[in-house]
Image (tube, rainbow, N blue to C red):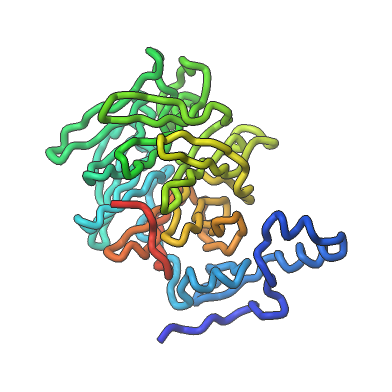
Amino acid sequence: MGVPFQGFYSEAAAPKRCCSHAALLNLDLAGLRRGLARLQMIRVSGIKNEFEIHDKRFFYLILGNAWVERLYTGSLWAEGPVYFADGAYLLWSDIPNNRMLRWAGGHASVYRDFSNYSNGNTRDRQGRLITCKHGGRRLTRTEPDGAITVLVDQFQGKKLNSPNDVVVKSDGTIWFTDPPYGILSDYEGKVAESEYGGADVFRFDPATGLLEVIADDFNKPNGLAFSPDENTLYIADTGFSHAHEGEHYIRSFSVNREGRARGGAVFAEISPGLADGLRVDIQGNVWTSAGDGVHCYSPDGCLLGKILVPETVSNLTFGGPKRNRLFITATTSLYAVYVAVTGAQRP
Ligand code: MG
């Protein structure tokens, strides 16, 4: 039997309903103040004070007797975790150290040295590793024999900026963001100009070689993820990284059967910090990186709760044999915590 929650959560203090924008708009000023008061941090101590409950639904997404474990430390900037359930291991990038690491059986090791400043990783539907690389400004696929295939490195004859994060749709198309982080300094790549002059979100079809722009109105597009039915695509804009008034939110797009994305309204503003990376669980909740840990949003954009992490979180992925363990890359370290829901991403 699980250890019951202890701490400060109470029915009286709890939010009575989702903090949806529509709900807030219907409140008078006094009601709005009360409503906002209820949205103040309500911290629940699992075992180690690592969860904040902002909505009661979050109780059913986390485990009261699970805690955040630090599995590894020693990176300069950890990013891009991807889990291989068939091999029981996790890969992630350590961008400034120009390497990829592997965690398996309780131990970390170097998976790939001189990784061309790899950043985001995912797997295609055949299980092959897909990697964004600042070095070479490209997207690659690692074949089963270890050979590396360059999938795309140009848009209309001009180099990409520095592909950052990537997801694969069930039809095999590869969707990725292309902000300039890898060409702004030599720390995570190499200083260079943006050749096509934008910072776009792309869809690449490896079957045809066709590269199409999905969105061209981002400042610094970053993490992205599909809803379980793939009808919604969430994309983060992290312009805040280089401007105090910059973007720090996730936008949501409707995706039709032909793979066209429409809409793009702001889904959630992330604070503190940024939505560098995000993932979606099978219920459609969005789990995103933030400055103080991992934030979880309902499909209608309500902040349900937080998992507090002692370092700035960059990215996360669901893994483990049951896909119910959240692996979190955060600055120098890799963390993990078991949760009560499973990830939607496949494989
Ligand atoms: Mg990123």
The front one of 8 and 72 is 8
- The picture places residue 282, in percent across and down from the top left corner, at 41, 60
- The picture places residue 261, in percent across and down from the top left corner, at 49, 36
Q: Residue furthest left?
A: 145
Q: Residue furthest top?
A: 157
Residue found at x 81% / y 61%: 27
Q: Residue furthest bottom?
A: 1
Residue found at x 29% / y 48%: 91
Write down the quadrant of residue 49 in the picture.
bottom right
Number of numbered tags placed on the structure image: 0
Residue found at x 54% / y 59%: 296
The front one of 267 and 48 is 267
* In the depicted structure, whether residue 267 falls above or below residue 59: above
* In the depicted structure, whether residue 211 falls above or below residue 12: above
Residue 181 seen from this side: no
The front one of 308 and 138 is 138
* In the depicted structure, whether residue 21 falls above or below residue 3: above
* In the depicted structure, whether residue 161 falls above or below residue 304: above
Question: Image check: 30 left or right of 290?
Answer: right
- The picture places residue 52, in percent across and down from the top left corner, at 59, 67
Write down the quadrant of residue 208 in the picture.
top left
Quarter of the picture containing the N terminus is bottom left
Residue found at x 39% / y 53%: 317
